[in-house]
Image (cartoon, rainbow, N blue to C red):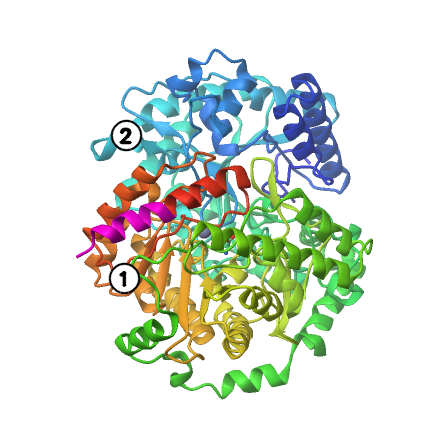
């Protein structure tokens, strides 16, 4: 169909159905294959994707959704925003690109951070007063031509100019806002649009998800001005501006007054968006690209309900097209390849299946429901089966949650807890510890894989893990750490391990989702009421504790992090699911205590990640997140010490919540911010134990003792010695022993040196 969008998806995974791009990238980076081979793999993946999407029946196929690393980095390169330190390396185009993504020699990479509230990470562009924009790279045009040669007409997708600048970081501090560069950047976008037009492109999609978050009136004004300008170009493709991850209505109100032809809205994340659309004047003159199929979660769409929504929209917009709520980048490729429980499988839709859903909805809108009766009834059956399935509900779990009272989430007075813990643990001032994991050696990984595939039996697997735990305990003893850990060798991943041991979760074999660059994760699927059939970690922790007189810390993942890194159910509020997970963790905490474990850490590195994009929704989120943590950790006596761990230091928005967690000890990243986090914590009256990370585990560099000593002295200016803990800033899983041993030795000698100076 020409002229209209009809049915489409906003974007598609690109790592490859078998992670072909991951392999090709890593082999090229390691020098095992050439850039030519990498380009060839990439080209085949693109062509395969375009053809698949066309053959599936989409009316409009998205283009330019491929990336060697990240779409924000691509945008920076397209418009020439390459910082001098990379350009000067004199590498080829792909070499410069990878240097920005991964660093090169002495040049560190661009900063990386999370893409809105997803677990995808983008590279943060650096923009300063001196940045000049130009159309420096023509990949979007080239890929349009490449698709055309392969027989597919595509709709190039670009990160929109406002979102690009709003995500960028100023190289000149507070005095400069990257958004001030908008007029210049628009000139470069205009040039690209003109070239795309000359190449024959009919539609271009510009993504502006930054406007699904809170924006100032100035920023909204800038949005309107920008699209009036781009829309006013005399020779240009038609424009679709899409926003997602939340309610985009505010931006739509502005955009409806500009010449852009189509507007995309996410109708899944915030279902009230459908109602607010009726208040958008000017929508009648536009095509509304309705995001009816969830692009971020893996449930089959209730097609009847989606069609009802679409019917409402027909009265509001000039034309309605059907789409996913956001790019399908955030879901795995294909559920058909999974060998999982057939009932649960019938409830799921991955990227391929979602494309099909969009096509069916598009056909129903165009030709009437009768054209797709079979598809609609299949979807209806699956949705009804899931809603009525007994395995989704566990009445015992529900009854336990109903019976909870406030005291279940309340520990005793902190000063009393502290005294009881000191009596039980007898720790020196500035106790030393680690965050949990020790290096995952090839041997450990091999043993886990061998057990998984049945090549070794449970008994020999257990023996290998015990040997590893013993080694790690002995190492910590010899280094002289105070609170030991078992090292987490049995865990492939801190969320998946628990998902595999809890009822209500299912794990996939190939459900990979890109996290950043070539890195993929395989989020477990949380489909039903969560229940812990038996203890999950007690055996490992008690084995470790038997080997030493020093306290061994039990290690658990917190409820919020388990939710953040899983696909969660959409049939009940997240708060309810969090409470169920919390209950399972609480059982584990209590079992650890009963087995003689006196220190228990419940990690919540994702507490900030799930923070809603809109400020108005944050208090409600933080309230249930904190309640879940407290429910998980309040079932123990005063003498049991609860630790938590957070992976970041910019916690402005969640700092009160961190206080409210009521953990006895909180470890946080701080090495890179020179202990400034402590002042932030003091400012809100945080008065419990704190372990600011004294060395950065993200780098292979080994800190020397003097450097750690300096950091500890700096920390002591903000926190008294009896509340200060000494630890690295995260788990040691990704490092090697060659770095970890000397680093921990230096950490211990620094703590000893500082202790000697204490009055
Ligand atoms: N306990 C985990 C570990 O040490 C924590 C990891 C994390 O914070 N992401 O690996
Ligand atoms: Zn961490």
Q: Secondary structure at mark 1?
A: loop
Q: How many marks?
A: 2
Q: Is residue 758 magenta?
A: yes
- Residue for point 31% across, 59% down: 690
Q: Which residues are magenta?
A: 748-759
- Answer left or right for 417 relative to 606: left
Residue under label 1: 723
Which numbered dot is residue 428?
Answer: none
Residue 629 or residue 553, whichever sits in front: 553
Q: Is residue 97 magenta?
A: no
Secondary structure predominantly adopted by residues drawn in magenta: helix
Report the quarter where the C terminus lies. bottom left
- Residue for point 46% across, 48% down: 283
Q: Nearer the viewer, mark 1 or mark 2?
A: 1
Residue 27 or residue 687, whichever sits in front: 687
580 shown above or below 334? below
- Answer left or right for 48 relative to 699: right
Q: Residues within 10 Å of mark 1 (few under 14, many from 20)?
A: some
In the rendered image, the residue lying farthest to the top is: 90
The percent coordinates of residue 433 (x first, y second) are 41, 56
539 shown above or below 79? below
Residue under label 2: 180
Quadrant assignment, res 704: top left
Quadrant assignment, res 343: bottom right
Point out the tag, 1 or 2, that comes first from the N-terminus: 2
Report the quarter where the N terminus lies. top right
The percent coordinates of residue 710 (x first, y second) are 26, 41
> Can residue 401 be seen in this snapshot?
yes
């Amino acid at each position: 169909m020409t002229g209209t969008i009809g049915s489409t998806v906003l974007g598609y995974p690109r790592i490859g159905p078998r992670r072909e791009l991951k392999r090709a990238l890593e082999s090229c980076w390691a020098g095992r294959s050439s850039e030519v081979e990498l380009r060839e793999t990439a080209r085949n993946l693109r062509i395969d994707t375009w053809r698949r999407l066309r053959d599936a029946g989409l009316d409009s196929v998205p283009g330019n959704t491929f990336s060697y690393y990240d779409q924000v980095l691509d945008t920076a390169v397209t418009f020439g925003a390459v910082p001098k330190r990379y350009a000067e390396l004199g590498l080829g185009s792909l070499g410069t690109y990878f240097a920005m993504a991964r660093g090169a020699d002495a040049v560190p990479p661009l900063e990386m951070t999370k893409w809105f509230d997803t677990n995808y990470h983008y590279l943060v562009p650096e923009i300063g007063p001196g940045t000049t924009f130009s159309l420096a790279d023509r990949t979007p045009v080239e890929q349009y031509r490449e698709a055309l040669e392969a027989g597919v007409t595509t709709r190039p997708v670009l990160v929109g100019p406002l979102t690009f600048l709003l995500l960028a970081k100023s190289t000149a501090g507070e005095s400069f806002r990257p958004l001030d560069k908008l007029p210049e950047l628009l000139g470069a976008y205009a040039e690209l649009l003109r070239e795309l037009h000359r190449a024959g492109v009919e539609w271009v999609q510009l993504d502006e998800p930054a406007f699904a978050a809170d924006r100032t009136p100035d920023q909204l004004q800038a949005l309107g001005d920008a699209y009036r300008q781009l829309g006013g170009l005399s020779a240009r493709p038609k424009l679709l501006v899409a926003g997602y991850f939340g309610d985009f209505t505010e931006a739509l109100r502005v955009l409806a007054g500009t010449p852009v032809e189509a507007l995309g809205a996410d109708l899944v994340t915030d279902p009230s968006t459908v109602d607010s659309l009726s208040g958008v004047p000017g929508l009648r003159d536009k095509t509304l690209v309705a995001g009816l199929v969830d692009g971020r979660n893996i449930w089959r769409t209730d097609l009847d309900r989606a069609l009802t929504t679409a019917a409402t929209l027909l009265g509001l917009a000039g034309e309605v097209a059907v789409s996913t709520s956001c790019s399908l980048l955030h879901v795995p490729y294909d559920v058909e390849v999974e060998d999982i429980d057939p009932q649960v499988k019938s409830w799921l839709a991955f990227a391929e299946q979602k494309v099909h859903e969009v096509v069916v909805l598009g056909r129903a809108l165009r030709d009437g429901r009768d054209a797709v009766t079979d598809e609609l009834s299949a979807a209806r059956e699956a949705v009804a089966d899931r809603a009525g399935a007994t395995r989704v509900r566990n009445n015992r779990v529900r009854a336990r949650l109903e019976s909870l009272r406030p005291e279940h989430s309340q520990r005793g007075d902190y000063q009393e807890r502290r005294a009881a813990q000191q009596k039980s643990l007898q720790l020196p001032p500035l106790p030393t510890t680690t965050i949990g994991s020790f290096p995952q050696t090839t041997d450990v990984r091999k043993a886990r894989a061998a057990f998984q595939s049945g090549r070794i039996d449970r008994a020999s697997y257990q023996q290998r893990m015990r040997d590893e735990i013993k080694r790690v305990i002995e190492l910590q003893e010899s280094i002289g750490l105070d609170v030991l850990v078992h090292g987490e060798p049995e865990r492939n991943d801190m969320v998946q391990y628990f998902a595999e041991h809890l009822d209500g979760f299912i794990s996939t074999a190939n459900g990979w989702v890109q996290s950043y660059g070539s890195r993929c994760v395989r989020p477990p699927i949380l489909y039903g009421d969560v229940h812990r059939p038996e203890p999950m970690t007690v055996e490992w922790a008690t084995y470790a504790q038997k080997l030493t007189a020093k306290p061994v810390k039990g290690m658990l993942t917190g409820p919020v992090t388990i939710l953040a890194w899983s696909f969660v159910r959409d049939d009940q509020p997240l708060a309810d699911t969090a409470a169920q997970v919390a209950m399972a963790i609480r059982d584990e905490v209590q079992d650890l205590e009963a087995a003689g474990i006196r220190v228990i850490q419940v990690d919540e590195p994702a507490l900030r990640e799930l923070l809603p994009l809109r400020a108005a929704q944050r208090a409600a989120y933080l309230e249930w997140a904190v309640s879940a943590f407290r429910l998980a950790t309040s079932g123990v006596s005063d003498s049991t010490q609860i630790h938590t761990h957070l992976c970041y230091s910019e916690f402005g928005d969640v700092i009160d919540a961190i206080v409210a967690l009521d953990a006895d000890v909180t470890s946080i990243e701080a090495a890179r911010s020179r202990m400034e986090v402590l002042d932030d914590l003091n400012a809100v009256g945080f008065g419990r134990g704190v372990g600011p990370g004294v060395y950065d585990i993200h780098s292979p560099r080994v800190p020397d003792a003097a450097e750690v000593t300096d950091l500890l002295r700096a920390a002591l200016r903000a926190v008294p010695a009896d509340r200060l803990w000494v630890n690295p800033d995260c788990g040691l899983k990704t490092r090697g022993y060659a770095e970890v041993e000397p680093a921990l030795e230096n950490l211990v000698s620094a703590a000893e040196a500082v202790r000697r100076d204490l009055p």
